[in-house]
Image: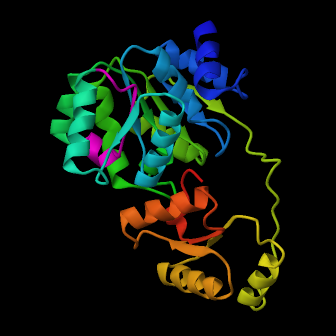
C-alpha cells in the first residue's frame, strides 16, 4: 500500500486513512467488487478517487446530480488531478474537449449521470477506452425500496455485461438491509466485500421541538447566529421560495434551492453557499445528496 499512502499525501494532503478506507482501497486495487455503506463526511469519495490515480486507465463515476459532479471535479482539479464531467451543463465545445481528452488518455476520473452512461453510443465509446474502475455513487438510487429511487440507476445493471472484468464499487450513505441486497443484486456485484462504517456523527447535535408558530421559532433560532451557515428543509418548492424571500426581508442572506430552478441557477446558489456568500439555503430534498 506504499503507493496509496504516497498518493494520499501528494494529492489529498493526508498522512493516514480514515476508518475502513485503507481496506476498501486495497480491495479495489485487487480488482474486487465492493459495497460501501458510510455516512456523508466519512470519506467515501476517496475510496474510489485514490485508486483511480493508481490504476492504469480511466475511472467512471456515476453521480446523480450535476451540482455534485461539479463539486467533486472542481475539488479534484484543485488537487492537481485530471478529472472531468460530461453532462447537460457543458456547451458543445466543452463536451468535445472532454471527449478528446478521454481519447488521448488525459483524464483519470470521469463523472457522468446514469442516464447518459447507458446510452448505447456512449457505452460503445467507453468500451474503446481502458476503463479501470466503475464507481456508483449514491447507489441507493437504484433500489425501488429506497427513498431516492431513480429509474436511470436501475438500468446500470447492464454495466457488468459490458465491462465484465472491471471492478465495480457501490457507495451510499443510506441503505437498509433490503436496499443493500437490492443494490447488490441489480448491479450484479460479484461476491462483493461489504464495508459498513458507524453512523454516529459526534459533530452533529439533534434536537426536536414542538411546532408553535414555526416562523417565529425560526427567527428566534437564527437570532445571534448571523455568522453561521445552515440549510432549512421545506416540503414543497413554493414553501422554499416563500420562506427564502421572507428571510431575505428579515436581513438574512438566504436563497432557495429546488428542482424547479434552472440547473445553472442551482449551481450558482450552491457555489455561493460554499463560498459563504449566502448563509442560508432554503431547500427541498433536491439539496439532499452529498451534503
Which residue is depicted at the point 75% across and 81% down? 218
184 sits to left or right of 60: right
Quadrant containing the C terminus is: bottom right
Give percent across and percent down for residue 178. 55, 46
Give above or below for 133 relative to 209.
above
Q: Is residue 115 magenta-colored?
A: yes
| Residue 130: quadrant of the picture | top left
Residue 154 position in % (x across, y down): 35, 46
Residue furthest to the bottom in view is 213
Q: Position of residue 146 (x, y in %)?
A: 51, 54
- What stretch of residues is rendered in magenta? 105-118
- In the rendered image, the residue lying farthest to the top is 2
Position of residue 163 relative to residue 116, above or below, is: above
Q: Is residue 59 left or right of residue 23?
A: left
Q: How is the image coloured?
A: rainbow
Q: Residue furthest left?
A: 121
Quarter-of-image position of residue 9: top right
Image location of residue 85, percent across then percent down: 36, 41
Residue 210 or residue 76, whichever sits in front = 76
Specify whether residue 32 is in view. Answer: no
Total numbered labels placed on residues in the image = 0
Residue 39 visible to the viewer: yes
Quarter of the image for the N terminus: give it: top right
> With 249 as the anchor, is 182 left or right in this view?
left
Which residue is found at the position 51% from the left and 20% from the top? 51
Residue 285 among magenta residues: no
Q: What residue is at 84 percent from the left and 75 percent from the top?
A: 224
Name the residue: 55% across, 86% down: 242
Amino acid at each position: 500500500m506504499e503507493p496509496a499512502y504516497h498518493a494520499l499525501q501528494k494529492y489529498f494532503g493526508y498522512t493516514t486513512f480514515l476508518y475502513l478506507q485503507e481496506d476498501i482501497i486495497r480491495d479495489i486495487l485487487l480488482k474486487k467488487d465492493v459495497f460501501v455503506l458510510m455516512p456523508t463526511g466519512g470519506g467515501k469519495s476517496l475510496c474510489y478517487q485514490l485508486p483511480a490515480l493508481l490504476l492504469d486507465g480511466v475511472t467512471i463515476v456515476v453521480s446523480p446530480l450535476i451540482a455534485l459532479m461539479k463539486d467533486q471535479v472542481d475539488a479534484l482539479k484543485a488537487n492537481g488531478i485530471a478529472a472531468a464531467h460530461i453532462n447537460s451543463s457543458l456547451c458543445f465545445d466543452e463536451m468535445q474537449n472532454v471527449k478528446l481528452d478521454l481519447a488521448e488518455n488525459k483524464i483519470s476520473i470521469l463523472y457522468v449521470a446514469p442516464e447518459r452512461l447507458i446510452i448505447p453510443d456512449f457505452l460503445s465509446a467507453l468500451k474503446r477506452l481502458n476503463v479501470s474502475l466503475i464507481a456508483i455513487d449514491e447507489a441507493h438510487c437504484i433500489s425501488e425500496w429506497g427513498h431516492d429511487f431513480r429509474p436511470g440507476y436501475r438500468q446500470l445493471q447492464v454495466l457488468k455485461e459490458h465491462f465484465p472484468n472491471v471492478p465495480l464499487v457501490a457507495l451510499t450513505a443510506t441503505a437498509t438491509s433490503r436496499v443493500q441486497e437490492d443494490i447488490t443484486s441489480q448491479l450484479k456485484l460479484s461476491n462483493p466485500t461489504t464495508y459498513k462504517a458507524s453512523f454516529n456523527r459526534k459533530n452533529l447535535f439533534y434536537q426536536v421541538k414542538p411546532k408553535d408558530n414555526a416562523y417565529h421559532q425560526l427567527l428566534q433560532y437564527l437570532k445571534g447566529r448571523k455568522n453561521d451557515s445552515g440549510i432549512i428543509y421545506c416540503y414543497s418548492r413554493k414553501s422554499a421560495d416563500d420562506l427564502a424571500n421572507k428571510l431575505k426581508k428579515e436581513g438574512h442572506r438566504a436563497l432557495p434551492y429546488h428542482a424547479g430552478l434552472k440547473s445553472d441557477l442551482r449551481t450558482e446558489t450552491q457555489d455561493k453557499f460554499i463560498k459563504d456568500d449566502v448563509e442560508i439555503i432554503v431547500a427541498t430534498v433536491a439539496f439532499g445528496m452529498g451534503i
